[in-house]
Amino acid sequence: MRYSVIADAYEKIEATIKRLEMTDLLVDLLKNTPKEIIDKVVYLTQGRIYPDFVSLEIGVAEKLAIKALAKASGCKETEIEEDLPKTGDIGESSQKFMTSKKQVTLMPQKALTVERVYETLDKMAKASGSGAVDLKTALLAGLLADATPKEAKYIMRTVTGNLRLGIADMTVLDALAIAYGGGKETREFIERAYNISSDLGRVAKTVVEKGLSGIKKFQVLVGEPIRPMLAERLSSPEEILEKLGGKCIAEYKYDGERIQIHKRNNEVTLFSRRLEDISSQYPDAIELVKNHVKARDAILEAECVAIDTETGEMRPFQELMHRRRKYEIRKAIEEYPVSLFMFDALYFDGKDLTLEPYPIRHHALKKAISESDRMKTAKYIITSDPKELENFFQEAIEDGCEGLVCKSMAEDSVYQAGARGWLWIKYKRDYKSEMTDTVDLVVVGAFHGRGKRTGTYGALLLAAYNQDKDVFETVTKCGTGFTDEDLARLPKMLQKYKIGHKHSRVQSIIEANVWFEPAIVIEILGAEITLSPIHVCAVDVIRKGSGLAIRFPRFTGNYRLDKAAEDATTANEILEMYQKQLKRIS
Ligand code: ATP
């Protein structure tokens, strides 16, 4: 196929902003494309040569482009550099310089084909190592030398990542439906294929070669990310249960990064919510998959959460951001290791599960993994009782989660790839109370440390002072912010207050390993104050059965030795902080 056919089509597409017209032009182009290269033409119209999830780029920087253009056109690099700010587009400049060259030399000997352009771009993308820049320059100059000025414009825009024809994925799907599916109404089948593969090229090839019946049998493939299913939102357990037919599987909504795990034999790839390959950010998660996924081949979904190594508690989402920086990954793996909370199975040993109802996928998920401390299925209950759902929600918040995802168990509860629908409903708090101020809390108990903290305390149980009742009410458990010196100092400091049972003035539902007489006060900064079923600070005031708790507490390093236990922040003050800072979450 001549590349000029593509260049002509691009020119017309560029000239329109009407989606219908654009679709018609695309339909013409696809109909004129030989079957064998339909996938390549589809990628090219998107300004790419592979599907989006393949991270390989053609990667031509401006400098390299100028060099290649100079070589092909016989102009000086400085001339091109001077022209570029005027056109603002390397494509325009290429067309201009190649036109002036063509006026003094003979026309190109052989017409450029799409196959040759594609192959050359492919070689450029794969070029690596020390000779890569020279090789890419030579390959690009070779293409330009045989291109017409118009072709040169589009080749240059493609290799520099500036094609931008404005053809949305959905327009390609429309065009495929019209050209090869038998009409626009067949779009839904083609779209589903796209949603479970994210690969427009494979979808195009299937519909062209196998028609509509082929596309209806389209299956997921390990290695091709499935577009994620998303949740709608409601704000009461009653509404949620009603919408889900009276009964649901309610799961913790963990606050981490969504990860789609693809495993074939011992090869593992991790994709982000935006379908990028993020395997290199999570070598520890890959190890977990290798050790705990029993299935030979699988596509599973999980929320990846940073864990506090000392207390085993979940850390806020932000702490995963260290993984974004290449040079910090090694450190992040040590300081913020991750746990995987598994919540769906889309493929399991040869079987595409995307059209199976959730109870079957959930069952497959449990079969696919061997649970460990660091890899578990998301905590869940099956319920039809709004009260039970509400309690489970409170428990999720207390455990450091964002809330719940309530999932349909009905016959039709398939995996709706790429869609936000009512089969999943998230239940999050409408209000959030952010802490800006520190609080001074009394140490009333402690928990033995594990790992590096064996022999000292892993976390302290802290309480606020209730003036009216003259008691100390637990409000949080804190294991973060302590230096090695603090850890060595604490047992000594607390030794003389150690008692064999909970102190009579301490109110606590939680059972500590060690109890103390309320005496030592330390300064704490938390992320927010939440309602809690397990802490008893200001219990029953806001809601019956709930106290207040401080989430994500961190020791600031200040021992308030100047304060007696009764000088600690009071339960009333915490209640006021909760009410004052209450902010509607958008
Ligand atoms: P949000 O900001 O609420 O996370 P979102 O648009 O990213 O919104 P939603 O569809 O609203 O996504 O919520 C689903 C998200 O919740 C998933 O993308 C996933 O990352 C996360 N999640 C955590 N736990 C679960 C779970 N058990 N099941 C499904 N999703 C979960």
Image (tube, rainbow, N blue to C red):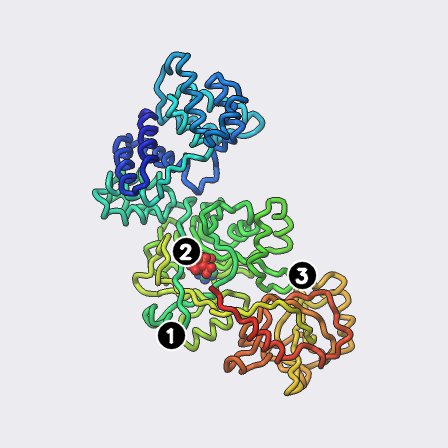
Q: Is mark 1 within 8 Å of ligand 1?
A: no
Q: Mark 1 and mark 2 in contact (Cβ < 8 Å)?
A: no
Instruction: Give the alpha-carbon distance from disc 3 to disc 2, as whole Å.
Output: 33 Å
Q: Quadrant of the N terminus?
A: top left
Q: Tell me which residue sits at (67%, 61%) in the image.
A: 451
* Rendered image: mark on residue 345: 2
Mark 3 highlights which residue?
451
Task: Name the side, left or right, on which 99 lies relative to 280.
Answer: left
Front of the two marks 2 and 1: 1
Front of the two marks 3 and 1: 1
Disc with the residue nearer the chain's start (3 vs 1): 1
**Viewer-closest of 252 and 87:** 87
In the image as oriented, which residue stretches furthest toward the bottom?
469
Instruction: Give the alpha-carbon distance from disc 2 to disc 1, as whole Å.
Output: 28 Å
Q: Residue 315 location in percent, x, y?
A: 58, 61
Q: Mark 2 and mark 3 in contact (Cβ < 8 Å)?
A: no
**Viewer-closest of 467 and 373:** 467
